[in-house]
Amino acid sequence: MARPVLQIGYHDHCFDGVASSATFLRFYREKVRPGLAMDQVSFRGLAHRAGQLFGEDAFAGEENAVVDFRYTRDPRLTWWFDHHQSAFESPDDEAHFRADSSGRKFWDPTAKSCTRFLARVCRDRFGWDFSQLAELVDWAEVIDGAQFPDAKTAVELTQPAMQLMLLIEASKDPELRPRLIRELSQRPLSEVLREPWVLQPLSPLLARHRDVVRTVTQRLRVERAVAEYDLADLGIDNVNKFIAYAADPSTVYTVAVTRGTNRSKVSLGSNPWKQDLRRHNLAGIAERYGGGGHPAVAAISFKPDQLEEARSAARTIAAELRAG
Ligand SMILES: [Mn+2]
């Protein structure tokens, strides 16, 4: 591709990241550059990891948007939408954002999903009607805000949109998420969910998901409402966040260790159905280790070979959460 007119960087392997991108893409092609051809838009999945977050090719477009991911002072960043508490790597980054006068950078750490936050900002500031994407926006709010009726629903994935969540989180096909973003920007969610290229790769992932649910349920150690499990030997980076709450509803916090290709990771979560018992800000805890996220759910990335450091951090944090 020649230099893309627009490049969208998004939180990779994340339903809200994909949905935010699709929503922004539609907004951009309707309100900012009407008639912009799809092949003039490129996509870059961004992942949290130990070290540099934005590679050299992260801002290859004439305009560059980043959604559902960290802020950067890079002058090539033209649009930004995020809702993470840990949006800024340093106080200088936050000061830079606060001094921005472009009117194109937006942050609301109280928003449940970046998708609905973005849709509403584009409606209120730019007079854009997002009703065509209502289904996608509503599902992003349910999924990223963990607004499920119960843990079982969140783990069993009987609803097609929940299966799409799994596909987005687990698929290793680099073309799949950009394709989903393009399609979801133009067609209703329920229609895209029936596509063979969506359904086909899902069945092995669903089978794998059921295996992981069994493994987590077996390995889970719950002590004083804090659940710990270690999946480093499975080589997976993303695990459904709700398995512990379905397996043992007395769980208030989870501390999980995983190791994927690019990082060892400690995931911190809190039971969405017991938020009245949550006493800790998990993003705040994760930030002490260079990680981040939201008060109710956060993560810390380590280098892939720093598994023992990750395990040791997990033990320390689990003890801190138990101490109350
Ligand atoms: Mn999000």
Image: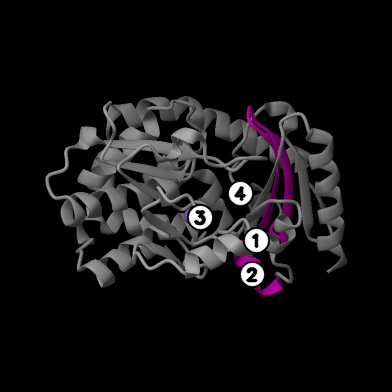
Left or right: 254 as drawn, with respect to 24: right
The residue located at (58%, 59%) in the rendering is 88
- Magenta residues (range): 249-277
Which-is-in-front pick, marks 3 and 1?
Answer: 3
Residue at label 3?
71
The figure's colour scheme reads one colour
Q: Work out whether residue 200 or residue 186 is closer to the camera in this orientation and state it.
A: 186
Residue at label 2?
275
- Counting residues from the start of the chain, the first of labels 3 and 1 encountered is 3
> Can see residue 187?
no
Q: Amino acid at mark 3?
A: Tyr
For ligand 1, tell me if the residue under mark 3 lies within 8 Å: no
Q: Quadrant of residue 186?
A: top left
- Counting residues from the start of the chain, the first of labels 4 and 1 encountered is 4
Residue at label 1?
271
- Percent of width and height locating residue 252: 72, 62
Whether tag 2 and tag 3 are in contact, CB under 8 A, the answer is no
The residue located at (51%, 55%) in the rendering is 71
- Percent of width and height locating residue 197: 32, 27
Q: Amino acid at mark 2?
A: Gln
Whether tag 3 and tag 1 are in contact, CB under 8 A, the answer is no
* Distance between mark 3 and mark 1 Cα atoms: 28 Å
Residue at label 4?
241
Q: Secondary structure at mark 2?
A: helix
Q: Please, is residue 149 above or below residue 4 in the view?
A: below
Is 203 magenta? The answer is no
